[in-house]
Image: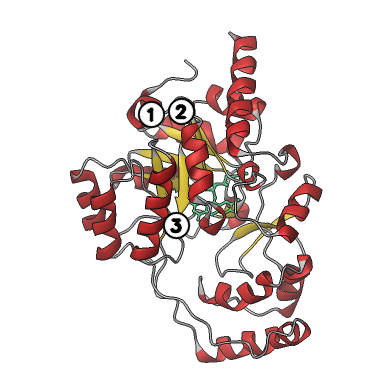
Amino acid sequence: MWPTNALTARLNLQWPILQAPMGSASTPALAAAVSNAGGLGGLGMWGRSAEQAARRIAGFRQQSSGTLNVNYPIWPDPRCEPQAAAAMRRHLQTQYDAHGLGKVPEPAGKVSDVGPEHVALLLDTKPEAPSFHFGLPEPDTIDALKSAGIFILSSATTVAEARLLEQRGVDAIIAQGTEAGGHRATFTGIDMSMQPGLFALLPQIVDAVRVPVIAAGGVADGRMAAAALMLGASAVQIGTAFLRCEEAEVRDAHRAALAAADDASTVVTDVISGWPCRYIRNELIDNLVASGLKPLPVPAQQSLTQPLSETGDRDWTALTSGQSAALATATNAAELVERLADETSRRLRAFA
Ligand SMILES: Cc1cc2nc3c(=O)[nH]c(=O)nc-3n(C[C@H](O)[C@H](O)[C@H](O)COP(=O)(O)O)c2cc1C
């Protein structure tokens, strides 16, 4: 069965390996290298204008004629209660002062709903597989993309979410286990402690839906990719291992923390961005948790913590990572795809 199936055939992939579209960490160079190596490259469009998104897509197309996934998070208007915003700004002022950052700004951010400009861009540039995180945009947007023959991906953290996505017309579902680095994809408000890990989640989603299922969360080498395929996945989506590739845009402090991480380094929290996300634990997290303050909505909270991240101080930088960081190595994207393909093939042959 490896490496060909209905999903790889539809998306014209040599290997069922997706590089997760990771916000600003996923560069056109990274996505292009993955697609050129036979996988599916992904570009995050978190907070990007349609013009910026167009430039990123063009950057990919200049470097690859392969298949592209572009990813949009979906969130409502992040308007903050003035008192909550003032309390968070007061709290962060001490660290802004310690890092010479001046006055904590007013929180910023607007709705992320794949508005008409982005829809026009997608219809014009036709990335082969757009994906959505934290649910889906309005039905009109889904209908417009599907009418243009565009294949749609979206992530689920439970069987109920997978069923909802299938009902709304999603063409392939990414089963995101709790091991995953980055933001939790959940859009039904289910408590974090009730969300399953990938080993439990994946076969249950495979049984529940008819569309292809992609395994995400903690997959970092061929053993794990082979296990996911044996559990019924049509492909794997990998984020954290690609963060260690030279083409990824990752701050030095973040790279060093990934290199030093072990199996118990990470925690899921909403204190950095306003949405639950898995990071390597550091002082930024401990300090905000200890404050007892409720984070502002995403991305308003992130607009206040981002300047601290930009200082490059490891203790005060957002260190996004999944639980398998220690299985990843410093490499480049072509080598990583090749190694994953080779190791997975070997593991599957051993069971043939
Ligand atoms: C740094 C980072 C940023 C991420 N940003 C996004 C994103 O913008 N959109 C998205 O759909 N998934 C995002 N993810 C989550 C991935 O899609 C995927 O679920 C996850 O990386 C899989 O787990 P792994 O990191 O253990 O491989 C991100 C992951 C990481 C590590």
Instruction: Decide which of 91, 31 is in the foreground and name it.
Output: 31
- Mark 2–mark 1 Cα distance, whole angstroms, equals 7 Å
Residue at disc 2, secondary structure:
loop
| Residue 15, x across and y down, in percent | 49, 26
Q: Amino acid at mark 1?
A: Leu
Q: Residues within 10 Å of mark 2 (few under 14, many from 20)?
A: many
Residue position for label 3: 134
Instruction: Decide which of 99, 319 is in the foreground and name it.
Output: 99
Query: Which of pointers 3 and 2 lies earlier in the amino acid sequence?
Result: 3
* Residue 154 visible in the displayed image: no
Does the CB distance between marks 2 and 1 fall below 8 Å?
yes
Does the CB distance between marks 3 and 2 fall below 8 Å?
no
- Mark 3–mark 2 Cα distance, whole angstroms, equals 22 Å
Give the number of the disc on residue 7.
1
Q: Classify 240 as above or below 279.
A: above
Which image quadrant: the C terminus? Answer: top right
Would you say the beta carbon of the disc 2 residue lies within 8 angstroms of ligand 1?
A: no
Would you say the beta carbon of the disc 1 residue lies within 8 angstroms of ligand 1?
A: no
Q: Amino acid at mark 3?
A: Phe
Residue position for label 2: 234
| Residue 228, x across and y down, in percent | 56, 28
Question: In screen coordinates, is 33 left or right of 265?
Answer: left
Question: In screen coordinates, is 123 left or right of 314?
Answer: left
Query: Which of pointers 2 and 1 lies earlier in the amino acid sequence?
Result: 1
Q: Classify 55 as above or below 215.
A: below
| Residue 252, x across and y down, in percent | 73, 58
Q: Amino acid at mark 2?
A: Ser
